[in-house]
Image (cartoon, rainbow, N blue to C red):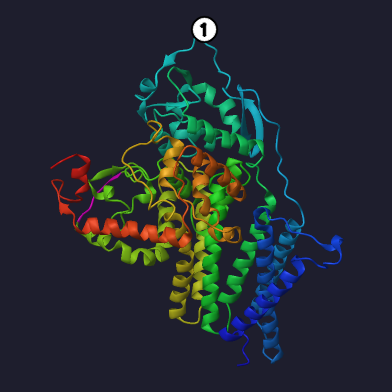
Amino acid sequence: SKSAASAPQLFFGVASGVRRAARSAEATLGTRDSRTPTMQFQLPVGHGAQAWLKVGVCFACAVVAIARDVSAFEAYGHEEPLLARSLRWASAACAAALGAQLLASSLTSEEEAAREENGDSSLTWREDEGVTKLVPLLPEKKHKAEGPPKKFTMEEVGRHTSRDDLWIIVDGLAYDVTSFVDKHPGGALPMENMAGKDCTDVFANYHASRVYKHMLPAYYVGEVSDYSVYPHVADFRKIRQELLRRGLFETDMRFYGKMAAWLATLFVTALWLSTSTGASSTRMAGAAVMGIFWQQLAGIGHDLGHSGVTHVFWLDHMIGSALASLMGISTCWWKRNHNTHHVVCNSVEHDPDIQHMPLLAVTPRIFAKPFWSTYYTKWVSMDAVARFLVSHQHIVFYPMMALARFNLYAQSWIQLLSSERLHYRRLEICALLVYATWVIALAMSMPTWLETVGWLLVSHAVSGLLHVQIVISHWAMAHYNGHAYNDDKDEWYITQLKTTMNVATPPLLDWVHIGLQFQIEHHLYPRLPRHNLRKARDLVKEVCKKHNIHYHEPGFFQANVETMKTLYHVACVASKSKRGDSGFYESALWDGLKLTG
């Protein structure tokens, strides 16, 4: 065939380019001349620079190979459309920009902006807009009361747990934050779920230094007389202090420069292949690349949602909201859902990320008895339909993940059209309309209705990798009823480690998992930039080993196996459930929990 757009030609052209790039990379990146010591050099391995460079070179060569074949196609007398030509060269330009950045970063050494050790116990390291600062541990009281401060016990503070009477503990001091609940940028649910608890570590990991200085003092009510710090907690706090001292909470914008070039390459390549006038397999390849683009872009959205890029709340939020025009998912919805998930990870009644009835149940506790979901504000129970679906969940799990993105679209619109107070609502609505317009237009540009449906299914199925990556981090881990953070067995760090797993990943493949392979470190220190999570992992594993705390880190395929085993086990329990006094199906687990029978 003279058509360079045929699948075999494209494949062999790309394969040839990759082989040539690999041989060239091995020859170039090694010793240039063994007889000339001055010509020998070793690329730094920080952030997998050497691996990234090789991948970038291979990808760029693949693009060049395709461009060469298309040029050959033109040589046969066929005129390439202007749009296709523009997208082709734009794709090559983006790949070249990525390769140039990778090359530049590989030839420069990575340096940490480490500070001197802090020897003053009254001072602590905190970060403000990503910049490490040494500040007083306890904020100065806004109103200096006469006489000694009021004293409260942990039990007394624990009585103030309602939305209308909400106290928290931070660094051994009690604060009445009732009047701030509805103003909280992270939503009311995280505050409600931490009511009456020691919030020291949660607060430190979600708030900048200026919040301690300018906002917290206004809510001070007294000291907690029986406040104490567990030994393992002290060590985990030392890790945070070390990360701050080394400047690892500061974002390296060069990382996001490379990510921008990578995402631009994926997006333009997806458009180029999807609008091809050649074989349908080429357009389906474009759909697959678009799915990879959405999966990779979700990593940026995740970073922005945690204020982990610029570390400026409004700026990261605004960028995330604007990116909804390419991503199709609301940052407002994501923050409300995800912030709650972090605080109450794997809580049956409170974590929205494990509340998927009637389609899925990740633990028999979900249908042990009907329960009230504080996130969805509704009763959750197992009726006959849910019993049937959950009993077969292990069979439909992966197909469901392939279509899960459509659910995120619906959740985004439900959130934006609600009456809840939201940031940048109008911006996100406009962005989602832009997204819907170009996605529908691109899908409708296919020559047949069958290809239109195929393009939508392929692109969304490939992006479904994201949903698999998310759920394997938690579903096979521990689950619990009610609230955690009661004692040394379920305080912040222990709870995160019990309910979260990492995915063992070689540095070469870090980009595939968009930071989700380090979910333990991310849950412990959510504002830590993604590109520094691997460094935190080394420190966390040391503390876990010291205190004999389980650190779970299987490989990607093993994590999938563990998740599937969990779903199968729950499906078996659901199939044997019987109708209880509530009128709904209940598992035998409830009798075990209540020591009945």
Which residue is identified by label 1? Answer: 146
In the rendered structure, the answer to whether residue 554 lies left or right of residue 40 reads left
Highlighted range, magenta = 378-383
Residue 508, visible in the rendered structure: yes
Residue 526, visible in the rendered structure: no
Percent x, y for residue 574? 23, 56
Element type where label 1 sits in the image:
loop
Whether residue 549 is in magenta: the answer is no
In the rendered structure, the answer to whether residue 305 lies left or right of residue 27 reads left
In the rendered structure, the answer to whether residue 383 lies left or right of residue 482 reads left
- Residue at image position (60%, 23%) is 121
Badge 1 local density, few (<14 within 10 Å), some, or many (20+)? few
Q: Look at the picture and state if 520 lies above or below 456.
A: above
- Residue at image position (53%, 56%) is 298
- Residue at image position (58%, 83%) is 277
Percent x, y for residue 582? 16, 46
Q: Look at the picture and state if 134 lies above or below 68.
A: above
Image quadrant holding the N terminus, namely: bottom right
Q: Nearer the viewer, residue 403 or 556?
A: 556
Percent x, y for residue 77? 69, 92
